[in-house]
């Protein structure tokens, strides 16, 4: 089933990615290892945060379902 119209993704990449995202969630982002994914809560919504760093820098992709 194609669910692409129901999912959004925002990438936050670069050396300040963790520090920047940490401001909008109480989840300790330092516990998410590279190439791992975790549910985090921001603004009352559960989203998935994947830590991949595909740009060569540390970074996260936030999946809104």
Image (cartoon, rainbow, N blue to C red):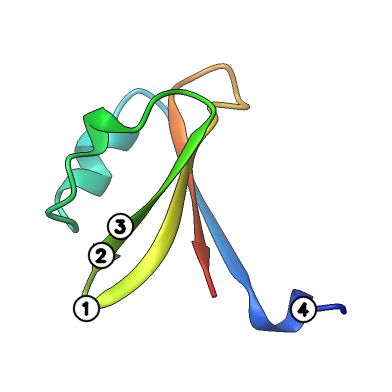
Is the residue marked by circle 4 packed among few (<14), some (14-19), or many (20+) residues within 10 Å? Answer: few
Q: Residue at x 41, y 65 (%)?
A: 47
50 above or below 33?
Answer: below
Disc 3 from disc 2: Cα separation: 4 Å
In x, y percent, where is residue 4?
77, 75
**Does dot 1 land on a helix, a strand or a loop?**
loop
Q: Earlier in the sequence, mark 4 or mark 3?
A: 4
Disc 2 from disc 4: Cα separation: 22 Å
Given contact means CB atoms under 8 Å apart, are the residues at marks 3 and 2 in contact?
yes
Residue 13 seen anywhere in this rendered image of the structure: no
Q: Which mark is residue 40?
A: 3
Residue 46 seen anywhere in this rendered image of the structure: yes
Given contact means CB atoms under 8 Å apart, are the residues at marks 1 and 2 in contact?
yes
Residue labelled with disc 1: 44
Residue labelled with disc 4: 3
Q: Is residue 33 left or right of residue 26?
A: right
In x, y percent, where is residue 22?
19, 45
Disc 1 from disc 3: Cα separation: 10 Å
Disc 4 from disc 3: Cα separation: 21 Å
Image quarter hosting the C terminus: bottom right
In x, y percent, where is residue 32?
34, 33
Q: Which mark is residue 41?
A: 2
Q: Which mark is residue 56?
A: none
59 above or below 56?
Answer: below
Q: Earlier in the sequence, mark 2 or mark 4?
A: 4
Is the residue marked by circle 2 packed among few (<14), some (14-19), or many (20+) residues within 10 Å? Answer: some
């Amino acid at each position: 089933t194609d669910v692409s119209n129901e999912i959004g993704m925002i990438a936050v990449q670069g050396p300040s990615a963790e520090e920047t995202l940490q401001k909008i969630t109480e989840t300790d982002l330092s516990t998410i290892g590279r190439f791992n994914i975790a549910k985090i809560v921001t603004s009352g919504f559960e989203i998935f945060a994947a830590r991949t760093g595909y740009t060569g820098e540390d970074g996260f992709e936030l999946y809104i379902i």
